[in-house]
Image: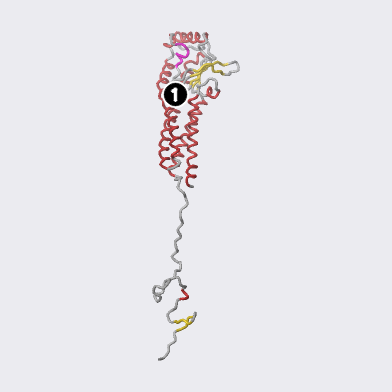
Amino acid sequence: MGKLGRFACIFVPMALTIASLICLILVFSGQLNKNMALQNDLYFFKADTKDFTENPDVLENSNLDNVLLQALTGAAKSKDLKDFYQVGLWNYCEGDTDDKNKDTVTYCSPRKANFWFNPIDVWELKNTTAQQIFPDKLKNGIDAYHKVSKWMFSAYVIAICLTAAELVVGIFAIFSRWGSLVTTIVSSAQTLFIVAAAVTSTALYGALAGTFESALKPYKIKASLGTKMLSVVWLGVAFSIASGFFWLISVCCCSGKSGHKKVVVEKTPYTYERVASPYLGHRDQGNELHNMPHSGTTTSGSAYEPFRHERV
């Protein structure tokens, strides 16, 4: 196998790490460019206000909700209330929906670290009494979202940095198992943060969508999760877990050393070997056994003859 086998062993986790990095890059790019369809489709949360109505069917508290209704109606008439709002990691985008239900993004807010979507600011309700009488459930949901969003953003940033570091350290894993061990440690940390970010964003925006849906349902304002964005996030998690597994395998296998070793042939215990004759002293042991005289014989020419006993 040698170095070629070691490279083949490292190729799989390296490819999975690259795939996880691509998924994170897509998550970071969501809602950054209003002119790119792919980025427009990647959002965590969407508020659909195109069906907003000035005549809600049910009002739990007519006095307070009427104030909110008037504020939303004023925003709708002044065109401050758009047809939809899509929330990404860095910012949000808004736009209009035509008669064929085709969404067109018209504006994307500037990028901001630790971004969170504040409907009071976005819907221009900050200077109205509506911000004071938002339903308690909606206010609590938005406050919780605001607090947790900072941790979520940090988790994604750390995850993408560790993924890049995993690729760099993974290069050294080609040459030794020690490199694989270090890469496995970095990969484990990366997996921890990307899983934490995925769980947080799924739970956070799921709760926010549920809060919007229940609190603003009477006004025909709908909320939903961005399934495409969450699919990309969890696909990145799957790639991360798989890469960590194969990095661990590379620590135990594929050492990179050549598998060719010098073969030593040992003699079997039954191999016949010539034993030097005690009658020949230090005579060359290369002579053939049949040329050696046997006890009780004498040589004559090239043949052996028995000893002749002569009388004196």
Q: Is 49 part of what is drawn in magenta?
A: no
Of residues 301 and 76, the one nearer the viewer is 301
Q: Which residue is mark 1?
A: 204
Of residues 294 and 121, the one nearer the viewer is 294
User: How far across and down, in percent of the image, does residue 9 sit?
Assistant: 48, 42
**Quadrant including the C terminus:** bottom left
Q: Who's the residue at 43% across and 24% down the image?
A: 153
Please name the amino acid that badge 1 sits on. Answer: Leu
User: How far across and down, in percent of the image, does residue 196 sit?
Assistant: 42, 29
- From this view, report whether residue 281 is shown above or below residue 44: below
Q: Is 122 part of what is drawn in magenta?
A: yes
The magenta stretch is 118-125
User: How far across and down, in percent of the image, does residue 73 sit?
Assistant: 50, 9
- From this view, report whether residue 252 is shown above or below residue 201: below
> Toward which corner of the image does residue 113 lie, by quadrant?
top left
Of residues 250 and 215, the one nearer the viewer is 250
Label 1 environment density (alpha carbons within 10 Å; few <14, some 14–19, many ≥20)? many
- From this view, report whether residue 118 is shown above or below residue 307: above
